[in-house]
Image: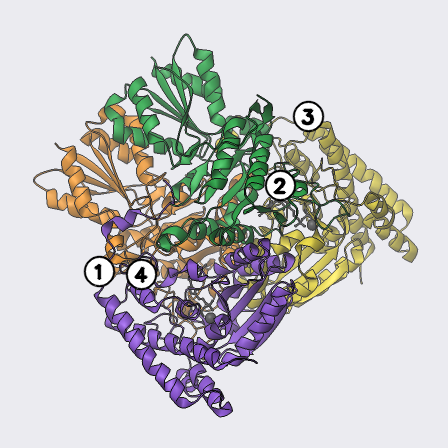
Chain colours: A green, B orange, C purple, D yellow
Amino acid sequence: MPLKSFREAINEALCQEMANDPSVILIGEDIAGGNGGVEGAAGSSGGMLGVTKGLYHDYGPERVIDTPISESAIVGAAAGAAMTGLRPVAELMFMDFFGVCFDQIYNQAAKFRYMFGGNCTTPMVVRGMVGAGFGSAAQHSQALWPIFSHIPGLKVVLPSSPHDAKGLMIQAIRDDDPVIFLEHKVLYDTKGEVPEEPYAIPFGEANITREGDDVTIVAFGRMVNFANEVADKLTGNISVEVLDPRTTSPLDTEVILESVKHTGRLVVVDEANPICNMASEVISLVATEALQYLKARPIKISAPHTPVPAAPNLETLYIPSKETIEKAVANLME
Amino acid sequence: MPLKSFREAINEALCQEMANDPSVILIGEDIAGGNGGVEGAAGSSGGMLGVTKGLYHDYGPERVIDTPISESAIVGAAAGAAMTGLRPVAELMFMDFFGVCFDQIYNQAAKFRYMFGGNCTTPMVVRGMVGAGFGSAAQHSQALWPIFSHIPGLKVVLPSSPHDAKGLMIQAIRDDDPVIFLEHKVLYDTKGEVPEEPYAIPFGEANITREGDDVTIVAFGRMVNFANEVADKLTGNISVEVLDPRTTSPLDTEVILESVKHTGRLVVVDEANPICNMASEVISLVATEALQYLKARPIKISAPHTPVPAAPNLETLYIPSKETIEKAVANLME
Amino acid sequence: MNLDKQQLLQAYRIMRRIREFETRISYEFAAGTVPGMTHLYIGQEAVAAGICLTLSDEDYIASTHRGHGHCIAKGCDIAGMALELFRKEGGLCKGKGGSMHIADVSKGMLGANAIVGGASPLACGAALTAKTRGKNNVAVAFAGDGATNQGTTFEAMNMAVVLKLPVIFAIESNGYGEHTGSGYAQGNDLTERSAAFGMAAVKVDGTDFFAVYQAMQEAIARANRGEGPTAIECVAMRWHGHFEGDPQHYRPKDEVKRLRDTADPLKIFRDKVLAKGDLVAADLDQLDEEILTEVTNAVDAALEAPQPAPEELLTDVYVSY
Amino acid sequence: MNLDKQQLLQAYRIMRRIREFETRISYEFAAGTVPGMTHLYIGQEAVAAGICLTLSDEDYIASTHRGHGHCIAKGCDIAGMALELFRKEGGLCKGKGGSMHIADVSKGMLGANAIVGGASPLACGAALTAKTRGKNNVAVAFAGDGATNQGTTFEAMNMAVVLKLPVIFAIESNGYGEHTGSGYAQGNDLTERSAAFGMAAVKVDGTDFFAVYQAMQEAIARANRGEGPTAIECVAMRWHGHFEGDPQHYRPKDEVKRLRDTADPLKIFRDKVLAKGDLVAADLDQLDEEILTEVTNAVDAALEAPQPAPEELLTDVYVSY
Ligand SMILES: Cc1ncc(C[n+]2csc(CCOP(=O)(O)OP(=O)(O)O)c2C)c(N)n1
Ligand SMILES: Cc1ncc(C[n+]2csc(CCOP(=O)(O)OP(=O)(O)O)c2C)c(N)n1
Ligand SMILES: [Mg+2]
Ligand SMILES: [Mg+2]
């Protein structure tokens, strides 16, 4: 199977779904790029990080739509288009920009179906970068999935591998509900096997990336890779099961509960800030549903309750580390 | 002591702090009201729900500033004024409107201190209504405190009584950090004893509204009153301790842990939507820090993962009920 | 203007329906039977009628918190509307939306909106659908004068110009935003401000159906020629308070009386068509009667209708779970 | 214009500092020593200098992602800036902000801002402080041409007019927003669009220090008279890419060469003052040399400086915990 980067995998998903369904359009800033520049430049950018590269040339200005720097208008236009028959994929570039347009996401797109008693669908995707690790500092490095996951009506996707990124993006586009699709910027250049043909990965189905008997690690996004490395390193010593929920909403509570019932020990790793995050959610789930199976206190590993610092050494300390995960697993076995 | 309504208590806090400190100003839509209307009408509204009533007459247009319907400009202006020496109290009317201005709250006001390495303070308050129960439907009834509590740099206040509303508002205004002050609309007309003189209630100190030995209920905002009623009703049968954290950020983890260590049983009641909410946070806290003290599975009581429905009968079902709380407490004792 | 008799009757029907429906709702509100908040449209009927009269179900409107008039003008069922306002089973939104979220997407009515300025970006999206599909449809963004100060409205105006979207911004200058006079909250004339985005913009008398209608015809023609958006500022004061129950201290004492006497859109319409001889009084009187019956039946039935089933709390959050 | 020799030297000092500082940063970026993203200001020096020259520490500016020039012009310490860009201990923000969040509130520099359009509401707030205290100070909101399409900018403009705030909107029309030509993204001329909010608005040559300075003097006078905000659109193209490393496919091949030849703000300034005899070449040459040393020392020291202490991760989130 061909090796592709996370970035290429998303690009391929977008490209295949656009080929497959003429109602799929892309809208955002510089997703074509070069509009209004020198002749022939239109399409030369393909997104600030190249995720939409080439799509303008394949599908033209009617379907790859560059906009002014107006996120409320971008997301609102996507929502309005989705209500009326298109399947827009709106790009926010850095998800951190959701603060200027959250109303259109959370009060509008997410609520139409319920407020209108089911008389419309809003099949749209809002995609953008998340995560620390690139030195992008406080306003360009946030995790934010806890906020999106809190909102009823939104589905929230957080892929950890190129393979999942493609399959989840295809599902996101085909899904009839509004989907928040979060791309960890540090993963863009990671490579993995990605089948050529289109495939959809259903939402709400966790991936068991490592099977094990002693400790369950539930990890999100980039942290799945850290957890896998720890599991591999400990092989022979401690048998670690790693779960990648892939979507934080809906969350695969069944697989999580089953795993914890089997291992009796739980570590949850969430790069997000710690208060009301997915780690809290998973631990609360296990405590309320499977308390008696727990052989030890569950351990929560998250970023601290601070913004993301600019200094590289501080940023490294900010992000949950493999060492911390390993230590937590070891502690649970004492 | 005089009986005052929740609404009057907040008004009094605003009024006393404005008298006390000329750098306190109010800014928002219709907080004076009547500007641009018939002569002499300015100040006639005092906020959509009358919370700022009279303040325009006492402090004039320079300190009670009506604005266009432009929440980003309102909150941003408050943040900019706070950085430069004022202590603004911005009103968002319904907190549900935070979606059009969240960037100015979460990327700007909340982060300045950290991003700028401590070289500024941002002493401002953003206040507004929260909560269901008034038939205001999906876009005017949300809880939202989990989202604000997730953000490092924000302090989040959720008073449950007139007494606390006054003391917490005074603290909010005097506090040097940005504070989100959430007023439950259903509480506005509740009355309670409120001392005449100004007093500040420190943040992060839970109020033990009922002492007990069998079950701990941690409840937020309006739910504190429900929990108190349940505790009173069960007196003699089951001894219930009720904790009102008063601020969701900072959260008084100490008192919560102590109480659970004493009772061994926990119910958390949060009117917010269930995913990544404060109930999850408290249960996760207890599971990670005091697992061995738990005699039974903790119970989480929240609104369902849906928007707030308009129909009164559905809205009543949406809001956690006293019956559900009572049943949970009873179940824990079985 | 080339309106035939049927169209004139339809224009009047819309306006009378709005007036009758809301008059009854106002009465019911005072009686305590309407849950939640309600913002009435009375006084602005000619705007909804003039904007919506020639739109088809494939044309879209995105509305405001003051949305009943837009609903009626866009052809939403009165009985379904009444059920929705009382939040009953069978309402347009199954009783889950209420006055501020009433919608019928099948009729091209994309919803009232409790967020001021929320509608304009949505209208851009509906227009984008028409444009992407190569259809000659338009989308109307209704916005109060107050709403034009919201960032979303500005962004939508600029984006509509940039992408040449077939959007019509119907600005309803009704003199107030809540309890604040519009003059206080806007730094300049709204028609000028809209024009500065680079689109055609006109100010019309919003109590005159014909003025609104004509501006709308021109806007549609412009959109169909691929020239993008138009702003139509319609000046027509509201007669009721911001919401029902508003004591309206900010208002000149005699303002509403003056409006009723001199700025009644229905009366203005009636006088014009009768004077020109396009309709006779009997036509209109008959409609008045029909509509009174229609509204009475709709509201009476809604009052008696059952509440939504409890299971409805948990449905319609997602299409698939 | 009544600029004395000291002021002229100071104007040139600011511009030369920006040029020298950023030229070195560009070099360092290419060498891989600058963490994160960096957006350079070169080509726009006369804007920062013209806007900030006569501001005091009690006047405020709120800046953008392209903020180094504004910092320098507002009097921020170059050594502290260099430390901050390399994210080192002792940086203006202790290394926790970096290029896009550099700030020195004590100097009235309220921060670069990584959110496009984020600055304008903040400037309104700083102006509100001045107004509330009855002081004759102003606040400048810097905004790129692209940023003027953000709802926050529009809202701030309208609010500044309504509240008559002493805000100056310094719009930097540098031809692009990221990889998109500004002509694509704005439906109309920005000066006209700003004026339509009801404020004075002028367009000036942003490569000409004197043009910017004069417009600013008039804006300040207007603000001091209580007449509220002014928009100054300063036209000056950027010479570098959107960020360092940008391949700039969207740009005409010879554009930058043309700009260097014909639109160099420093050269334009030098030619003017020499021609008028206000300064002699030796004055400027000496400054050039001084500044080269100053910048070299600052950057060299910053490269060698230690990273922030690990404990810094957890400080400065709140004033009190
Ligand atoms: C974003 C937002 N801000 C504030 C409000 C509160 N609000 C409801 S209606 C209204 C006034 C709207 O004025 P205008 O747009 O002129 O419409 P009108 O009520 O006059 O029809 C306000 C401020 C809101 N619903 N949404
Ligand atoms: C709200 C928001 N949207 C998008 C971006 C990404 N972004 C960073 S700079 C930029 C272009 C800004 O253009 P302009 O305002 O003209 O400033 P210039 O870079 O030309 O100085 C964009 C879109 C952002 N940082 N914030
Ligand atoms: Mg109005
Ligand atoms: Mg630019």
Residue that label 2 marks: D100
Disc 2 or disc 3, which is closer to the eye?
2
Instruction: Characterize the local packing of mark 1: few (<14), some (14-19) or many (20 or more) Cα atoms within 10 angstroms.
Output: some
Looking at the rendered structure, the secondary structure element under dot 4 is loop
Badge 3: chain ID: D
Marks 3 and 1 on same chain: no
Side (left or right) of D7 relative to C83: right
Tell me, yes or no, whether the two marked residues, 1 and 2, touch with CB atoms within 8 Å.
no
Disc 3 or disc 4, which is closer to the eye?
4
Q: Which mark is residue C85?
A: none
Can you see residue B157? yes
Instruction: Characterize the local packing of mark 2: few (<14), some (14-19) or many (20 or more) Cα atoms within 10 angstroms.
Output: many
Residue C106, picture quadrant:
bottom left
Q: CA distance from mark 4 to mark 1?
A: 10 Å
Q: Amino acid at mark 3?
A: Glu
Can you see residue D227? no
Q: Which mark is residue C91?
A: 4
**For marks 2 and 3 on the same chain, the one whose residue lies earlier in the sequence:** 2
Marks 2 and 4 on same chain: no
> Residue at point 57% right, 29% down?
A6
